[in-house]
Image (cartoon, rainbow, N blue to C red):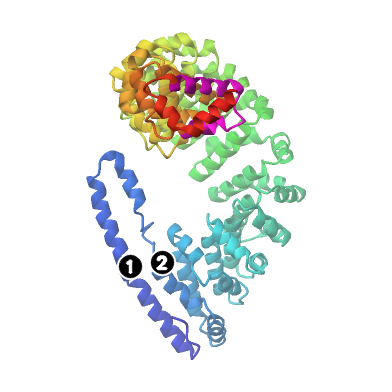
C-alpha cells in the first residue's frame, strides 16, 4: 500500500494495517516454513555424508527474524515511493512523527538478519534516498531510526554500502549526526560509521574528508557519555585500517591518549577492550608501532595486563595485539628479554582458560621465528604436556607450537625419541578428540616426517591408518588436507607401504576426494597421492578399477609445471599395463587436457616433449591407437609441436 496523504489519522491507521499484515505470515512465507519443516525431516533420513549438503540447499529461514521477499516489499512500500515525502511532511507538521519512527525501527530490526538485509538491499523502489532524507530531520528519534537502518543494512553488506554511497550527500548526512545535541544520536552515528567503513577504503576516506574522523577524535577525547566514547573508538578502529586515517591520528598524537586511557580506566573492561582494538588497528603503521614499543614499553606492559585481565573481550583484544607484535621480526629481542618467560608462566598457571590459551596463542605466533627455536625448545616438556591438558584449547596450543618447533632434523628426531610422536599418533587415532586438535597434531607429524628415518618410526607407531580414516572428515577440508599430506609423505617411494594402504581400504576413502568441490587444495593433494601410488606396479590394477585414475586429468590440468610433470610420470607408469591403458582412454576430459597443455606456451619444453612421447606410444598401442586418432586436433598438435 501507498501511504495516504489525506490526514494524520489515516496515516496511522494505514501503518497499523501494515503492521497487522507484517505479523501475519503470507502464503509464500507459510510455504517457505512448510518446505523447511519437510526438508528437515528428509535431512534426518539422509546418510551422514549428505546431511550437511541437504541443509545447505534449503535455507529459506536464515534466523527467527527472517521475512519473505513479499513481506519485506510490503514493509518498504509503506515508506518508499512518490507519496512518501508528502506523507512524511504532513505527518511531521501535525505531530505524527511516531509513525515514521516505528517504520524506521521496523526496517532496522528486519535488517539485523543477514537474509533480510540482502533482500532489502535489492528491492525496488530502493529505500536508500528515503532513509538518507530522514538523516536531515530535526527530530532525534527519526535520525536515530535512520542511522539504525544505515548501520544494519551496511553491516557486512558491500552492495548496501554502494547503494547508500550513490545517494547525494549520504556521507555528509551521516557525519552530521556526530554533532547532534542528543547523546543517543551521536552514539548511533558512530556505530553506523563503524559499519559503513569496515573494510571499505572509499567510505573511510570520505568520512575523513568530510570531517568525520576529526569529530570522532574529539568525541573520544572529550565526550562525557561513556557509550558515545566507546562507539567513537570502535568507529576509529575500523577507519584506522586506512593509512591516511592512521596518519591523521598519529598527527593528532592519539597514541599517547590511547595508551594512557588503557592504563588508567578502571572498572570498564569493555571500554579498555575497544581502545586496545583501536591500538591494534593503528599498529599497522610502523612508526606508531615503534613508538608504542619503545616509548611506552608497550609489549611488556600489555603482557602484564593480560595476566590480570578478566573480561573475555579484553583478553581476546590483548591477545590479538601481542600476537601481532610477536609476528614482527623487529620486536623479537623484546620478547626474548623477559616477555617470553612471562607468557610461559601464564600458560602453566592457574589463570582462566581464556588467559592461558591467549598467552599460548601469542607464544605460537612467536614460535614461527628462527630466533624462537632455542629458547622455546628448552621448554619442550611444557608444550608436550599440554597435549594431555583437559581443555582442547591448550591441546591445540601444544600441538601448534610443537609443529612450529619441528623445523630441524635434530629437533624432529628428538620428538620421536622422547615419545612426542607417539602421543601425537595417539591423538589422531582418538575419535573423541576435537578435530582441531587432531588437525594440528597431523601437521606436527607431517613436519616430523620430513626426516626420512622418522618416517619408518611413524609407520611403526601406526600413523598411516588413522590418518587414512580422517579422509572421511569432508566437512573439515583443512583436516583432510593435512591427513592426505601426511599419508603421501609416509608412502612416498615405499611400495610395500603403498600395497598395505590399498589392502587397508585406502582407495575407497581417497578416490571421493578427487571430486570434493569445496576444496581445490584437497583435490590436488589427493590427486598427487594417487600419482605417487602409481609407483607400485602391484596396485596399478586396483587404481584402475577404483576410479582413482581420474586424478590424472587433475594433475595434468594444474597451473604448476611441477605437478603436471608428476601427472606425466604417473601416466607413463600406468600405461605399462594394458588394463590401465583401457581405463586411461576412457577417463573423461583427458584429451582436452592434452590439447590445453600443447597449446600452452608457459610449460617447459621437457614437459611438452614428454607428453608428445606418451601420445606417440599411445598411438602405437592397440588399445589406444583409435582413441589417439579420433582425437585429431590433439594428435596433430602433438606432431606439429614435436617437429
Determine whether, in the image, residue 387 is placed left or right of residue 285.
left
Q: Position of residue 642 (x, y in %)?
A: 58, 23
Sequence-first disc among 1 and 2? 1
Which residue corresponds to the image point at 48% horizontal and 90% vertical from the top-left?
Answer: 7
Magenta residues, start to end: 592-619
Which residue corresponds to the image point at 59% horizontal and 27% vertical from the top-left?
Answer: 603
Q: Position of residue 153 (x, y in %)?
A: 52, 62
Determine whether, in the image, residue 284 is placed left or right of residue 323.
right
Most extreme residue toward the bottom, as rendered?
Answer: 6
Callouts 1 and 2 close, C-beta under 8 Å: yes
What kind of secondary structure does the magenta stretch mostly adopt? helix
Q: Would you place residue 117 above or below residue 91 in this image?
A: above
**Disc number at residue 245?**
none
Quadrant occupied by the C terminus: top right
Q: Residues within 10 Å of mark 1 (few under 14, many from 20)?
A: few
**Disc number at residue 28?**
1
Q: Name which quarter of the figure residue 625 lies in.
A: top left
Q: Residues within 10 Å of mark 2 (few under 14, many from 20)?
A: some
| Residue 594 part of the magenta-drawn span | yes
| Residue 283 part of the magenta-drawn span | no
Disc 2 is placed on an element classified as helix
Q: Nearer the viewer, residue 515 or 40?
A: 515
Q: Which residue is mark 2?
A: 69
Q: Name which quarter of the figure residue 290 lies in.
A: top right
Which residue corresponds to the image point at 40% horizontal and 78% vertical from the top-left?
Answer: 18
Amino acid at each position: 500500500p501507498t501511504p495516504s496523504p489525506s490526514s494524520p489519522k489515516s496515516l496511522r491507521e494505514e501503518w497499523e494495517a501494515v503492521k497487522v499484515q507484517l505479523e501475519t505470515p503470507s502464503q509464500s512465507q507459510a510455504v517457505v516454513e512448510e518446505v523447511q519443516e519437510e526438508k528437515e525431516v528428509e535431512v534426518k533420513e539422509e546418510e551422514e555424508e549428505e546431511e550437511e549438503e541437504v541443509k545447505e540447499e534449503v535455507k529459506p529461514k536464515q534466523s527467527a527474524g527472517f521475512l519473505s521477499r513479499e513481506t519485506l516489499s510490503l514493509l518498504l512500500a509503506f515508506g518508499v515511493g512518490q507519496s512518501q515525502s508528502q506523507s512524511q511532511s504532513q505527518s511531521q507538521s501535525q505531530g505524527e512523527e511516531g509513525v515514521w519512527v516505528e517504520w524506521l525501527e521496523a526496517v532496522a530490526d528486519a535488517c539485523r538478519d543477514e537474509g533480510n538485509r540482502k533482500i532489502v538491499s535489492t528491492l525496488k523502489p530502493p529505500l536508500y534516498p528515503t532513509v538518507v532524507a530522514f538523516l536531515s530531520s530535526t527530530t532525534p528519534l527519526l535520525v536515530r531510526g535512520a542511522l539504525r537502518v544505515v548501520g544494519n543494512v551496511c553491516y557486512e553488506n558491500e552492495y548496501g554500502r554502494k547503494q547508500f554511497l550513490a545517494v547525494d550527500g549520504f556521507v555528509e548526512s551521516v557525519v552530521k549526526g556526530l554533532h547532534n545535541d542528543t547523546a543517543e544520536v551521536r552514539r548511533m552515528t558512530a556505530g553506523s560509521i563503524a559499519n559503513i567503513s569496515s573494510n571499505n577504503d572509499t567510505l573511510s576516506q570520505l568520512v575523513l574528508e568530510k570531517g568525520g574522523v576529526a569529530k570522532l577524535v574529539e568525541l573520544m577525547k572529550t565526550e562525557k557519555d561513556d557509550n558515545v566514547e566507546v562507539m567513537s573508538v570502535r568507529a576509529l578502529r575500523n577507519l584506522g585500517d586506512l593509512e591516511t586515517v592512521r596518519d591523521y591520528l598519529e598527527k593528532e598524537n592519539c597514541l599517547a591518549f590511547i595508551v594512557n586511557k588503557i592504563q588508567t580506566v578502571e572498572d570498564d573492561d569493555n571500554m579498555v577492550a575497544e581502545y586496545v582494538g583501536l591500538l591494534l588497528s593503528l599498529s599497522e603503521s610502523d612508526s606508531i608501532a615503534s613508538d608504542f614499543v619503545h616509548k611506552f614499553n608497550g609489549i611488556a606492559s600489555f603482557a602484564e595486563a593480560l595476566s590480570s585481565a578478566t573480561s573475555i573481550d579484553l583478553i581476546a583484544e590483548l591477545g590479538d595485539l601481542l600476537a601481532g607484535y610477536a609476528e614482527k621480526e623487529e620486536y623479537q629481542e623484546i620478547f626474548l628479554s623477559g616477555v617470553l618467560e612471562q607468557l610461559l608462566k601464564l600458560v602453566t598457571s592457574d589463570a582462566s582458560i581464556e588467559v592461558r590459551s591467549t598467552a599460548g596463542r601469542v607464544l605460537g605466533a612467536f614460535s614461527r621465528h628462527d630466533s624462537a627455536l632455542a629458547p622455546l625448545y628448552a621448554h619442550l616438556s611444557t608444550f608436550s604436556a599440554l597435549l594431555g591438558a583437559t581443555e582442547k584449547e591448550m591441546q591445540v596450543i601444544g600441538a601448534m607450537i610443537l609443529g612450529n618447533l619441528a623445523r630441524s632434523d635434530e629437533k624432529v628426531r628428538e620428538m620421536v625419541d622422547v615419545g612426542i610422536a607417539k602421543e601425537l599418533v595417539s591423538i589422531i587415532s582418538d575419535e573423541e578428540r576435537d578435530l582441531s586438535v587432531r588437525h594440528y597434531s597431523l601437521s606436527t607429524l607431517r613436519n616430523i616426517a620430513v626426516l626420512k628415518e622418522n618416517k619408518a618410526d611413524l609407520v611403526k607407531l601406526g600413523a598411516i591408518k588413522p590418518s587414512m580414516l580422517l579422509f572421511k572428515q569432508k566437512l573439515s577440508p583443512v583436516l583432510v588436507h593435512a591427513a592426505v599430506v601426511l599419508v603421501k609423505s609416509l608412502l612416498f617411494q615405499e611400495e610395500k607401504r603403498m600395497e598395505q594402504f590399498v589392502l587397508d581400504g585406502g582407495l575407497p576413502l581417497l578416490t571421493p576426494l578427487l571430486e570434493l568441490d569445496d576444496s581445490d587444495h584437497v583435490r590436488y593433494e589427493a590427486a598427487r597421492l594417487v600419482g605417487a601410488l602409481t609407483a607400485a606396479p602391484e596396485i596399478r590394477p586396483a587404481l584402475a578399477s577404483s576410479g582413482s585414475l581420474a586424478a590424472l586429468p587433475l594433475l595434468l590440468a594444474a597451473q604448476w609445471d611441477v605437478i603436471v610433470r608428476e601427472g606425466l610420470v604417473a601416466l607413463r607408469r600406468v600405461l605399462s599395463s594394458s588394463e590401465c591403458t583401457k581405463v586411461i582412454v576412457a577417463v573423461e576430459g583427458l584429451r582436452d587436457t592434452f590439447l590445453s597443455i600443447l597449446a600452452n606456451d608457459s610449460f617447459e619444453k621437457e614437459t611438452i616433449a614428454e607428453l608428445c612421447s606418451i601420445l606417440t606410444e599411445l598411438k602405437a598401442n592397440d588399445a589406444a591407437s583409435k582413441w589417439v586418432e579420433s582425437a585429431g586436433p590433439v594428435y596433430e598438435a602433438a606432431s606439429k609441436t614435436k617437429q
